[in-house]
Amino acid sequence: MKRLAAVWLRYQGLIALGLGAAYALIYITLSVLRHESYHSFGFDLGLFNQVFWNTTQGRPFESTMSQALPLPHSLLGDHFSPIFLLLMPFYFAYPHPETLLVIQTLVLALGAWPVYLLAKLKLPDGYAASWVLAYFLFVPLAFINLYDFHEVVLSVAPLGFALYFLERGRRGWFLISLLLTFLVKEEMALIGAGFGLFVLLGKRDWKLGIGVLLGSLLAFAAIIQVAIPFFASGRSYPYIGIRYADVGGSPSGILKTLVTNPVRIAKALLQPKKIYFLLAIFGPVLGLSALAGWASLVLLPTLGYLLLSNYEPQYSFTSQYSAPLIPLIFGTAILALARLHRPAQRPVMAAVIVSSLFFSWAFGDMPFSRKFDPALYTTQPRYAAFVPKLAQIAPGARVSAENGFPSHLSERRFIYDYGFEGVQDAEWVVLDYEGTNYSLGVFDAQVASVEAAGYDQVATGYGLSLLHKH
């Protein structure tokens, strides 16, 4: 046992690197297999692939799918993600959905690096690789990695580096890392406000803290009220009013509700599914983040906008919305462990590994997890004879497709998700009964409806139909 501990201590850097390489290899393979076996979706892999492909064709950020808006429009009028421009050279090299899946996996693997560095900085030798192991076992990580492609995942590594550089006292790199996240998605600026509070109250750096706090809030307001409406041709940002209607429907409304009717806020927070969510994400690290002192403030904005929402995917550990919490939970847990007395650190670290293994097995999506479904990575026989018939669709043709097919046919200017947008002006329609929750009755009704709209069925399979406008 002592010999094993000595090897772990001596080679922890190589061990951490090996864990990252193994994770990347496994999850690149799984995510690509999931797509190529027709288990990915139009929302969101097809949507983002169309945006990237259109950008390579000289139509930056153009989509006919985001917000289920079937006319060509800018994705930036839906979500503010200019960071995609930094990824374009990689997509140019291989302009297909698989590139996005590989990038996503590599970005999540990269997120372990600041975890390793922070643990090296704050804890005794030998702990850093253990935290990397806990990171790769973290319940939301695999689910996010295997659920198509989402822009919010690109925040994981920069947020981790922001916390690490802040603890290192490297102000410039801290600000660069934090500002980089503002280019990922609009809500990242709110997370910046949490960092500002931590710097202000925890680091007692009044100038930097107030600057980051006010700058983040101003950036959020500018993105929501100016940038997104500009790209949306004047339409206002819709998500706050829809998803937070129960607690005020706007930032000022939420604050007013908090002051005038705190019970309403408490009811929104104390729902069973939200408590289950909190247990699933904090359980693997034993809730250590709560003991991180002022550093815990960095968690509050993300937890606030996830838990106050009435949109269930936002408080589900199987969806992409929890991605920004990953580096923040691990960073604050490491800082909390560093606050404990030295004799307590080793057993607590051991308990974190045991807990991470248990949660990953019981609730996660690792190959050894009890709910892992190998069927999601194999192609159903019914596609074998049907998929070659899709070669009839010309590269520039307008297509409306269902379920996983939009992600396979999205390298075109006009692609519609049948389930959200209907037929529109498509020349071709591809239907799959999986999009109807495996209801052949509903599927047959869909086929009949499309035929009645002026389409002929030119290829079929079990629960599959390819139709062309006559």
Image: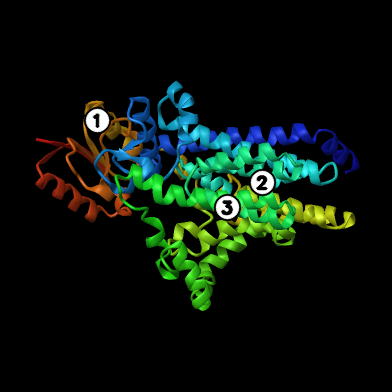
Image x and y of residue 267, in percent: 50, 75
Q: Quadrant of residue 333?
A: bottom right
Q: Position of residue 299 (x, y in %)?
A: 62, 56
Residue at the (82%, 46%) spot, across then down? 123
Amino acid at pointer 2: Tyr
In three-dimensional space, the C-alpha distance between marks 1 and 2, rounded to whole angstroms, equals 43 Å
Q: Do the residues labelled 1 and 3 touch (CB within 8 Å)?
A: no
Side of 446 relative to 283 (left or right): left
Residue 333 showing in the rendered view: yes
Q: Where is residue 184 in the image (x, y as percent from the top left)?
A: 50, 41
Marked residue nearer the N-terminal end (3 or 2): 2
Q: Which residue lies furthest to the top in this view?
A: 93
Comparing 404 with 427, the one in front is 427
Q: Which of the two marks, 3 or 2, is nearer to us in this view?
A: 3
Q: Where is residue 334 in the image (x, y as percent from the top left)?
A: 74, 51
Q: How crowded is mark 1: few (under 14 residues within 10 Å), some or many (20 or more)?
A: few
User: Which of the two discs, 1 and 2, sits closer to the camera?
Assistant: 2
- Quadrant in which the N terminus is drawn: top right
Q: Name the residue under label 2.
A: 135
Label at residue 389: 1
Task: Decide: few, some or many residues near mark 2? Use Cα within 10 Å; few <14, some 14-19, many ≥20.
Answer: many
Q: Which residue is drawn at 14% across and 50% down?
A: 449
Disc 3: CA contacts within 10 A as few (<14), some (14-19) or many (>=20): some
How far apart are the alpha carbons under marks 1 and 3?
A: 56 Å
Judge from the rendering whether residue 365 lies leftward or rightward of residue 207; answer left or right. left
Please state which amino acid type lies under the numbered disc 3: Leu
Q: Mark 3 points at which residue?
A: 214
